[in-house]
Amino acid sequence: MSMGAAAGFNVLWLQSGGCGGCSMSLLCADTTDFHGQLRDAGIDLLWHPSLSIESGHELSTMLDRIADGRLRLDALCIEGSLLRGPHGSGRFHVLAGTGIPMIHWVSRLAARARHVVAVGSCAAWGGVTAGGDNPTDACGLQFEDDRRGGLLGADFRSESGLPVINIAGCPTHPSWVIDTLMALAAESFTAGDLDQLGRPRFYADQLVHHGCTRNEYYEFKASAEKPSDLGCMMEHMGCKGTQVHADCNTRLWNGEGSCTRGGYACVACTEPGFQEPGHPFQQTPKLAGIPIGLPTDMPKAWFVALASLSKSATPRRVKLNAVADHLVVTPAVRKTRLK
Amino acid sequence: MTRLLVGPFNRVEGDLEVTLDIADGRVTSARVNAPMYRGFEQILRGKNPHDALVYVPRICGICSVSQSVASARALADLGGLEMPPNGQHATNVILATENLADHLTHFYLFFMPDFTRPVYASRAWHAEAERRFAPQTGEQTRAAIAARQRWFTLLGTLAGKWPHTQSIEPGGSTRPIEAAERVRLLSRVREFRAFLERQLFAAPLEKVSSIASEAELWAWHAQDPWRGDFRLFLSMVKDAALERLGPGPGRYLSYGAYPQPDGGFELGGGVWHAQRAVLSRLDEAAIREDATHAWLADSAAPRHPLDGLTLPDADKPDAYTWNKAPRLAGEVVETGAIARQLASAQPLVRDAVARHGGTVYTRVLARLIELARVVPMMERWLQQLQSGESYCVPSPHFTEGVGVGLSEAARGSLGHWIVAIRGQIANYQIVAPTTWNFSPRDAAGTPGALEQALEGAPVQEGELTPVAVQHIVRSFDPCMVCTVH
């Protein structure tokens, strides 16, 4: 435990208008020694709400030292959205024991931080907390949905010159966080490693569709019709995996999971505004029977042509299994050698 | 008299501030503030009822599955749905995985680190506590995080991901389990069992859960007082007088946990009245939420959740928290593992509560006993999954009506109430376990469960964040984000 020795890469982690799920997800990082892994990467966790002993006065003293520049801060990690309401006062979240709204603490500390990291979609865009008519006037650190701005403003750059790094996801994947912090600590992370929404490209240059175990069903448009069906969920069940930037089906969750492997649709939780899709989450919006949200990079006419062709060529096995919750037809075993 | 403002309060889920009045080295009065509000009940209005299953897990990252289960039950009630047995068992395994992970996280990461504080430096067990439970470096802390990570791989298979799974539906689970997967899942449960049996209990789970009285417990403890983390904790109980610290209101609420296909519960519910040692049936209709001291629009009289109202009013005089004050037939109740163990007639917990009341010691004891009791149940539910049988029935289009979903999260009774009109959510109200435990005063001025438990807590000279207060607060394992939604 350190109160801020000079050597390591100092990380301060604070939570605001979120659920704590990104912290809980972080502890599921794929390692046999969570703290050992951080330490080996030179990361020194100054304070984390779930993992640190310091309470009350001990923490407020530390925050004052950072804000005054007496304690170096290499990465300020914020989890949860920033609650600006009511009426711009920030009183929907006052940092306990200090009487000061969290948005003011975050602005003060961000001005001292070498890097500012938004952990999860709430801190990145506002997230689910900004859903409905956004009763708390929630926003992200540097975005409000897909509009630049947020709490810190479109032009904000941390001391390193980088904008806020948006490790979006609801929750975010533990490896996305660990990889980002390790790259920052190793000084190997540059502006070129961010996509146009400020997300680390190592996961945002992938689509959820990549590696989806339902891809054979997708190829033939053999579609699930109800929860627990095995078929592709794009056509009827609201799945956005072909449009959503994340590597969930190649870098799995909790050992071997992903939303689509769990039997439910990708709701686009790494994308700005996912909390208000404009349609029921479990239904695919369509125009003249064709899904509106077509796969990224695919011309509509081609999609329609290919879909009708592949549907007419769907093997019986794929067609029947798509609407069952277990294999009803298994792949044929041929007597001949494969050629 | 002096007044002390304690916060930020960490190693709880979410944000918490406590105001203490102190005289003669004791807390004379406490006010508990949940200083953050997000407004899920407002966000849910106007949505398609089924969409609640995407929003509600996001209320809380530590008990997201509990929120899903309560919501799915409310929708099932609204739509008159029943799960097939496979769906019931899979849902129970998913919920139990989260609940037991919460107990493990609470014990190793949230509760025990306070015993490494310098205030205990003179105690015989202090060096050992530091070696085992120091945050970030403690041997057992690190082992527990590793065990927790492996444990949650169960949900990679069963639920796609954790937290914020959407595999839980009103009609069952969206993730059917094949025969080979079931065997792998069982081996993961056994891995966790091995951690508990080697590290936490240093004894077989069945041995621990069969301890029937305090006399038997302390005799077993005396055989090897520091062996295993449970017995080291018991050693601290006596030395730090944790059996007298933080007495609750003496009434305990459980909705019943882990429903079975035959309609019963693995851990039956009810209201346990400690003074009379009587279990009475829960009357859900007798729940009211009082908003007198919350920064929420007052609705003249306390309301049943189906008729509940949640509208922020940040300038309300005499309010001091975003949390409402739920009461059961007008009374303050405590909820949590202790209530489930009392309601389900666990003999050791009933004996311990009869002797000491609901205190720091008995709350933690109940949580650890629950770990020992539920793991074997999970093994049984997994064995009862039937290959080739259905896991889920589809939901209808929810249009009109009301639904009530009651569940047990790790930290206690969780209820969701939904009113649907013309295919939209007209009202959605959530009463979380910490809403009960950390409620403020009601209109009659009666303090909530934690506020009562803090009265009388010792405060040592010069303490700004009194260690006894920290033990009491954390013994409830509060989840503030659930409380303020």
Image: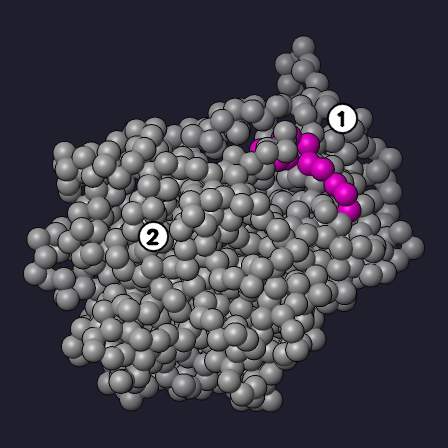
Magenta extent: B79-90
* Mark 2 belongs to chain: B
Q: Nearer the viewer, mark 1 or mark 2?
A: 2
Residue B306 shows up from this direction: yes
Residue sitting farthest toward the front: B276
At 82% across and 38% down in the image, what residue appears? A310
Whether residue B206 is situated above or below residue A107 in the rendered picture: above
Whether residue A36 is situated above or below residue A9 in the rendered picture: above
Residue A315, picture quadrant: top right
Residue A251 shows up from this direction: no
Q: Is residue B381 magenta?
A: no
Q: In the rendered image, which quarter contains the C terminus of chain B? A: bottom right
At 71% across and 50% down in the image, what residue appears? B75
Q: Seen in the image, is B27 located left or right of residue B238?
A: right
Q: Residues within 10 Å of mark 2 (few under 14, many from 20)?
A: many
* Mark 1 belongs to chain: A
Amino acid type at mark 2:
Gly
At 15% across and 41% down in the image, what residue appears? B225
Instruction: Return the residue nearer the eye: B205 or B320.
Output: B320
Q: Seen in the image, is B232 located left or right of residue B390?
A: left
Whether residue A91 is situated above or below residue B485 in the rendered picture: below
Q: Seen in the image, is A154 located left or right of residue B207?
A: right
Residue A174, picture quadrant: bottom left
Disc 2 target residue: B357
Amino acid type at mark 1:
Arg
Disc 1 target residue: A317
Instruction: Return the residue nearer the eye: A209 or A76.
Output: A76
Q: In the rendered image, which quarter contains the N terminus of chain B? A: bottom left
At 63% across and 79% down in the image, what residue appears? B298
Secondary structure at numbered mark 1: helix
Instruction: Return the residue nearer the eye: B200 or A183.
Output: B200
Alpha-carbon span between mark 1 and mark 2: 62 Å
